[in-house]
Amino acid sequence: MTTQPLMNHEHEALLAGFVQTIDQHSKGTGDFATSINGLTFFRRDEPAHPVMCMIEPSVVIVARGAKHVWIGGAPYRYDTSHFLITSLDLPANSEVVEASREASCLGMTMKLDLRIVAELIAQGVLPPRRDRGVSSSVGIGTASSSLLKSFSRMLELLDEPEAIPVLAPLFQREIHYRLLQSDQAAKLRQIASVDSQGHRIARAIDWLKLHYADPIRVDELADRVQMSTPTFNQHFRQLTSMSPLQYLKWLRLNEARRLMLNEHLDVSTASYKVGYESPSQFSREYSRFFGVPPKKDIASLREANTTNPQRPL
């Protein structure tokens, strides 16, 4: 469990600036894209129960309030003093724990570019690595003033849109550098290093995301990324908190849910579309995963979206 460090005046001023900027660029509850590639804002006006989502490799900064993300049953709390970082695409449950209409939970998410991380590591300008293997691809880090100032400089570009194409990549590179100097640097090193097991797992996940509807054999997937099957299974579970087949099931069921909800496919069509050979098996696994049968779940989601169109799924 993290402890709440005392914030100095500089830290508080930076957060106040974030709150003002995010407030200007977000109306209502939800997630909001910005004109800076890879940067989104979020606003939540009340605490909310966990919501399923896929977290991309990213860093999340909270300007006000607090959130939990649940990965593999483990909770990770992040707030104005702690950032969330993930170095792989991870199935998760996101929960808002501190928010109100008077003081919305506000923050921002920036996608990570692991190519930039690899370039910075290759330049050899970073402190020597001290990690001896990392057992997870998600972590909570201390939000230092140097990291927050990098974000502050990037946010100032929203008032100077003509400068975004030139300067935003420079500030994003600086943010990656600050993260590689943070207490969570090992998360990035293990994925960006081409010779690492984490990099191989990342390649396997990229392949699964493209081929989730195809018949999948774990031993063939392990061979694809040049790992033995036992080693592949071990590292995949360590980094994602799931087995490869559990991860595949998560991809298939959530894509089927999206197809039924947004493209109005029926249960059988959606099940075949995502790689199931039997709609009855699909319905059983869907019910176990989401807690309700497909038709009932989709009807409930549509009703909730009608009541609150900005409700995040």
Image (cartoon, rainbow, N blue to C red):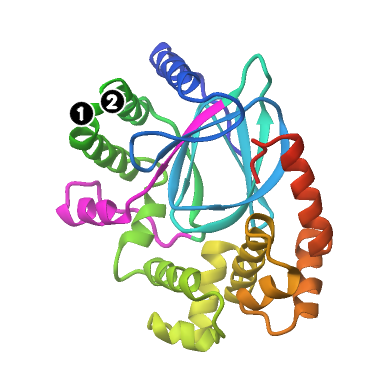
Describe the element under mark 2 as helix, strand or loop.
Answer: helix
Q: Position of residue 189 (x, y in %)?
A: 34, 56
Q: Position of residue 182 (x, y in %)?
A: 36, 40
Instruction: Reply above or below: 82 against 281.
Output: above
Instruction: Reply above or below: 147 against 196.
Output: above
Identify which amino acid the numbered label 1 is placed on: Ala
What residue lies at 73% left-to-right and 68% top-to-bottom? 266
Image quadrant holding the N terminus, namely top right
Q: Position of residue 207 (x, y in %)?
A: 44, 73
Q: Residues within 10 Å of mark 2 (few under 14, many from 20)?
A: some
What residue is pinned by disc 2? 157
Q: Nearer the viewer, residue 217 or 254?
A: 254
What residue lies at 43% left-to-right and 54% top-to-bottom? 87
What residue lies at 59% left-to-right and 72% top-to-bottom? 248
What residue is pinned by disc 1? 163
Instruction: Reply above or below: 265 against 123.
Output: below
Magenta span: 106-134
Identify which amino acid the numbered label 2 is placed on: Leu
What residue lies at 67% left-to-right and 27% top-to-bottom? 98
Circles 2 and 1: CB atoms closer than 8 Å: yes
Q: Give residue 212's mark.
A: none
Q: Nearer the viewer, residue 83 or 270?
A: 270
Gap between marks 2 and 1 measured at Cα:
7 Å
- On screen, residue 154 versus residue 187, left or right, reads left
Q: Position of residue 96 (x, y in %)?
A: 66, 34
- On screen, residue 102 versus residue 10, left or right, reads right
Q: Is residue 113 magenta?
A: yes
Q: Which circle's residue, 2 or 1, is located before the other in the chain?
A: 2
